[in-house]
Amino acid sequence: MRQYLKSHLIMLLIVGFIPASKANTIKPIDERMNLSMQQSEVEIQDANDFANLVANTVYIIDAVYSLENVNVVTPIPVGVTFSFEGAGMLLDNGALVGNNTRIVTSNNDNQIFDTVGEMGGTWDVPFIFPSWFGATDMPNSTDDDTLALQKAVSMGGNILLGEEYTITDTINITKNTTINSAFTANPTHTLIIYDTPNMISFVFTLQANVDVSIENVEIETNGLFELNSDASSIILRNNIVSNETLNAKTVIRNYNNIPRNIDSFIITGNHFEQVTVAFLDGTTSNELIFNDNVIRDCFRYLLRAESSADEEQGYISFQRNDIDGLRGNNAGDVARVLQASASTTIDYLDNTIRNIEGTAAANFIYWRAGNLNFIGNHCFDISSGTGAIHDKGLSLEYTVTIRDNVFDQSNTDLLVLPPEEFGGDNIIKRNPVLGIINISRAHNVNIENNEYLNLRTFALRISHPFTPTSDNSQLPENIVFHNNTVTNTNNKSVILVAPVVTNIDITNNCIDGLSNRRIETNHHPRFIEFSVNSSHPLAAVNDVVISRNTLIKVPRYAEMLWVNDGNFVCTSGTNIPAKINDVVISENSQIGGQSFVTFQGVNATGIRNLSITDNVYHNVLDITRGGNACLDIQEDDVTNVEVEPNLISCYNTVPIINETNPDIPKQKTTTIKLYPNPVTDVLTIESETVIKAISLQRSNGSFIKNIKPIEGKNRLNELNLENLAKGVYFLVIKTDTEIITKQIIKE
């Protein structure tokens, strides 16, 4: 319990002030005070007729004034200042209407108003203190401060919190309000809003179209903020928000998913622990900012902002967040870092994300449509569950850029681009295996300069919509997979392409180590796989470029490309067979492996316009039959490959060229000499046998250029590397009998 500084004045908490009969300093209204009072400062000894106050005048209040049941509905004259000198006003059931009225106190810890009357109008105060209404310091009191804080919020303005308070019920925000504890960059640990067993609702509810800001506050809560109205702006900045229970308490929620519009929603610089941060279904905003937050051991969603199919979020910024721990707490729960409806643009940049675990799904981003920039993120340790994806058939004319990210030790979905239907166990059952990047309907997807470490799922999976259109409009198209590095895979394929994609370009990638220990036997690891059963009525795969990729440390049972052509079967009522059309495979390098390219099928229906040229590899092009089918290759250019003997091939318009006799006995290893190494300008290559091809590559395996060798035995090949940047490079040299890789250092 606080006291007025005047020695004989005692404040009452929550229920009001000391009754007039027991406080000799409470005086009746004195008619002598109804003077003109033209001077700039007037001492008021009694309660005053507020209608007779003079504008722009300071009134010193050194006694407790009671309005009893008088409602002062006429605003106080403009510019009046109440200077409280250890005293206060007992509003009781009355009301006081400010008119840009200023309040000055000798000690802001003192109570100057009760919690019964109403404080209306406007007040010219730099800060509003809950202690003005009797809020008490937690270490000194366990009183309920809900009413005091409600009165402070009802005045509107900047509420400065300096102590710890107990809140046990909802506080309605009806005016522009800022709740702040200090002018510091980080929380000062001066406010804790405690949850109690009786508290069943949120601490703050938005009941009017106002601006709200909560900054530098430490909160222990069952729930912080509930939207019951539109708002111009909502800001949560530099707060610490936590929950000691293991239940998923939501920090920000939209009431009953009723549509709300927030012009600007900003969540920055906060520390969230053991909470669900934002569940904003039904809310749209022109801008939604979630930047520079620290997340520890939270539940289900960090940021979920879904709206109806015909509504669109504005700009979403999700940047520089440090996330360690997000999990679905119960069976069937998801763990989604960001889930949003259609947005104009999402900037998902420079986040560090670890330990995402959902029993039903685990996703970094899950959204309907809109331009996405997923750049510079470091993503570690994503585990448990498969993915559920949302696509309502909104506009697909957007651009997706996935660049300069690191995905490490992943074993389930990290990034899911939008396929088909929203949520539900049905889609989870139908789509049990997803990839780091899963594409079903997106157009214009650029996947560049990413690093995949310890891969346990597909780096890229291109699936198909379950309800395809007949005009190709919902097929994935324009997919670019360039300059990516994949190290240590443990999945059946790095890239899986289902038979519904147009224009995919896979170029300049380095695959270091293929493995498939966790997949059932008879599934060999592959860099690229064209497979998956489909009943799609359209052509399967069109306009494919696979060029200048490097595969090293390839085990004997692996291959670069595997085409299960037999699964491309049309069953939707037309007689147009599914095809693989316009495929170019050129200038790739593979060291080791069972096969370079394998076509294997049951009920195969054909491959049109296949070009396989200028590749450097160790093993054969394995074209094998399955069942009673035969391979249909039309208008093809197949060179620089080895072909399985005794293959039944039909409808060839050009011959398959078998450059190498597979029956030739294995020869001794060729001696290749490089000098000088390190090299500054000209590198000499000396070989005792004929060199057929030379390829220069970066240390990450990405292709630089092919070099035409000088024909003939014991010839010296000189390479001018003067303009090459300093660093480590590889030369891949092909002879008649083998492929040799040599490291060079450019100084």
Image: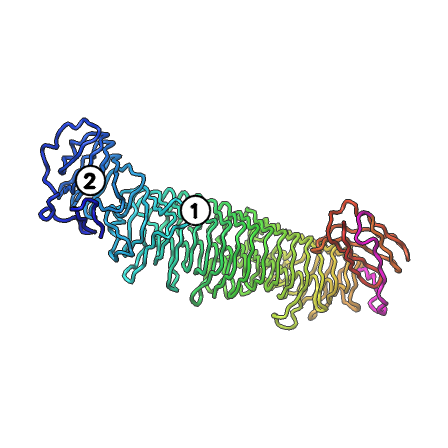
Q: Secondary structure at mark 2?
A: strand
Left or right of 724 in this view: 214: left
Q: Is residue 677 magenta?
A: yes
Inspect the image, locate mark 2, and give the three-letter code of the amino acid beneath it. Leu
Q: Please state the horizontal and vertical placement of residue 27, each as a whole percent of the image.
A: 11, 41
Which residue corresponds to the image point at 32% horizontal and 39% vertical from the top-left? Answer: 126
User: How many residues crowd around disc 2 within 10 Å: few (fewer than 14), some, or many (20 or more)?
Assistant: many
Q: Which residues are magenta?
A: 656-681
Q: Secondary structure at mark 1?
A: loop
Residue 705 visible? The answer is yes
The structure's colour scheme is rainbow
Inspect the image, locate mark 1, and give the three-letter code of the amino acid beneath it. Ala
User: How many residues crowd around disc 1 within 10 Å: few (fewer than 14), some, or many (20 or more)?
Assistant: few
Which residue corresponds to the image point at 47% horizontal and 49% vertical from the top-left? Answer: 291
Q: Main secondary structure of the magenta part?
A: loop
Cβ–Cβ under 8 Å for marks 2 and 1: no
Q: Tell us which disc is closer to us: 2 or 1.
A: 1
- Image disc number at residue 96: 2
Q: Please state the horizontal and vertical placement of residue 598, each as a whole percent of the image.
A: 71, 64
